[in-house]
Image (cartoon, coloured by chain):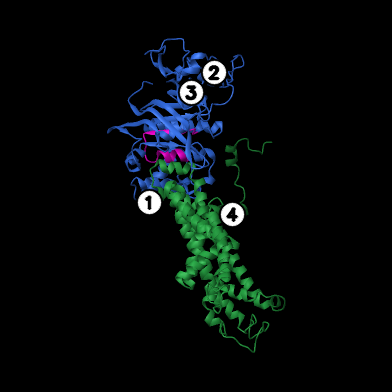
Amino acid sequence: MQPSEPILRLRDVHVHFPIKGGVFKRTKDHVRAVDGVDLDVYKGEVLGLVGESGCGKTTLGKAILQLVRATGGSVTYHGDAGETELTTLDDAGLFPFRKRLQIVFQDPHSSLNPAYTIFGSLEDPLRHYGVRSRAERRKIVGDLLEAVNMRREAMDRYPHEFSGGQRQRIGIARALSIEPELIVCDEAVSALDVSIQAQVLQLLMDLKREKQLTYVFITHDLSVTEYLCDRIAVMYLGRIVELCDAEELFANTLHPYTEALLSAIPVADLDRKSERIVLEGDVPSPVNPPSGCPFHPRCRYAQDVCRTDVPALRPYRTAAGGEHLAACHLIDQPPAD
Amino acid sequence: MSDVPLNPGDAVRSPPRPRTRRDAQFDRIRDREAARQGTKLRGGRFLSKFLNNRLAVVGLVIFASIILLSLAAPLIAQHDPKSPNLRAMLDPPSAEHWFGTDRTGRDIFARVLYGGRVSILVGLGSALLSALIGVVIGVYSGYVGGWLDWVAMRISEIFMSFPQIILVLLLVAILGQSLLNLIVIFTLTGWGGIYRMARARMLSIREEEYVQALRSFGLGPARIAYKHMLPNALGPIMVNITLSTAAFILQEAGLSFLGLGVPMSVPTWGNILNAAQDLRLLENAWWVWLPVGATISLFVLSVNFIGDGLRDATDPSQQG
């Protein structure tokens, strides 16, 4: 897919959480959950954001929606009215942009309010966005439920009466309710079993086509991204280490971390002897990231330069003439810049 | 083999099977669901669930009858609860004195009826008032956090760090001795507990994803906290209200005994019980303490049942 105009532009985004301790609750240190991310999201694409647990994917997703405020860098929204910097806006200023950006959560069991019926949960945002009459809100909620292949009558039921897959679809319906342009899917299918996953993914793709949506698809499941995404960004320890078209990533992996991730995908082919690259140890602590390349303690190619210098995310030419960004010192082709 | 239909389509052509009682039951369920479809479900469902809970209904009946009896005390009691009768001291229950008489010959039945007025007002009133204050502050500050939460927390700590009796002495000295002051005092000393409980619940609910979702819609904090989160925090708050009702009824007795609550001559359940704190009475005159003790227990129990019923009725995952 040829990138069109960007809808969202992230520049050098940092999200650091303070660690407080000691007698006077002084800030002792910071968890660098997101540590300098540059990323463009183009209109109408599906951007995959993959990485291990704790690499900052979810925090980045929440920073896009301003649920977590970035401590540095900029998040600009590119709409009809030009560019808007979101990180400096207060709640009132953000209000018009809340309508454009929405999120679907991971855990279908905590993403719906158990005390309210589905209608009760979904109607309040609608009222907030100016749908005054109750009859109209009921109609909209009913239509939304039908859009996610559920019965209208489901709106008068409570969350505990639904299965995980149904709840996830209701979560999608809620995200759609104010007609956003971009939806962040935060591990939206990870908690579902495989057959339901396929169903929900299919639904997401159908909705995307119908409503011209853009997705930022956060996941740790590479096989899902292969099926779904136009571009994939691989994150490691709060940084993006590789970013390119999905096909390119699977065909021509540049970063050793991505290589290890890909080798972990099970392949249903008895003849193929795949070499499994097992990464030693855990993700290093984001409080105290390693010097140089954040991946070097676990990288099997690591050399001296990796221990001292932080590799920049640099573009490389792909065979098809596209751009392939990777952050590694040891790539043996010259960067395109 | 041939009489078994091979696929579901064949079954349609087989003669209709006779209707059974179960079919009729299913029809009724279907009708009921259809009837419920268009109606406003929430209020009706809440009420029907509450009324289906037998214990809650029993509690409601006891609760209502105790309150009605206390309100109608002048119509029911044939004796003045305050006038002593020296010719009938410590009489056991009889047709004349249903619950007997106390040491100064006052009719205990009348005292229990009249006593209910003060005790229920103080107990339930202070419990509800302190719950109101505690919940209003705790829910908001627990959700919003920051300096507001810090300030609220310090204030509650100040109130809770004084021994209650000192606060009471202080307030009685300033405000004087009266029923209203008693309620004020209990509310001031009691809101901290419920505040902390409500705040703690909010801290854990705050991390739920549906709260994040509401925030991503840009809903205001008051709306999220009171409308969407509070219903999920109600369970423990209800239980706390019922428990503190009982505690306040007994505390009122203690304070009255010290001369800090209502005057000893005014009948309250606590005063009656206090008057029976005497080994001789405990052993020989059971009618002085048993009826009023049973009434307090019954009342507290009924509040408890109602609280339970309310909690279950507001929890949609409990079938009703």
Asked if marks 2 and 3 fall on the same chain, the answer is: yes
Q: Which label number is shown at residue A258?
A: none
Question: What kind of residue is marked 1?
Answer: Arg
Which residue is under mark 2? A299
Q: How far is the residue under mark 2 from the one under mark 1?
A: 58 Å
Q: Quadrant of the C terminus of chain B?
A: bottom right
Between marks 4 and 3 in the image, the one whose residue lies nearer the viewer: 3
The residue carrying pointer 1 sits among few (fewer than 14), some (14 to 19) or many (20 or more) residues within 10 Å by Cα, namely few
Q: Position of residue A58 (x, y in %)?
A: 47, 33
Q: Which mark is residue A134?
A: 1
Q: Looking at the rendering, which quadrant does residue A39 occupy?
A: top left
Which residue does the numbered mark 3 point to in the structure image? A226
Question: Which tag, 3 or 1, sits closer to the chain's start?
Answer: 1
- Closer to the eye: label 4 or 2: 2
Task: Evaluate if marks 2 and 1 touch, with contact meaning CB atoms under 8 Å apart.
Answer: no
Chain identifier of the residue bearing label 2 in the image: A
| Nearest-to-viewer mark from 3 and 1 | 3
Q: Which residue is at a point 33% across and 43% down the rendered structure image?
A: A92
Name which residue type carries label 2: Cys
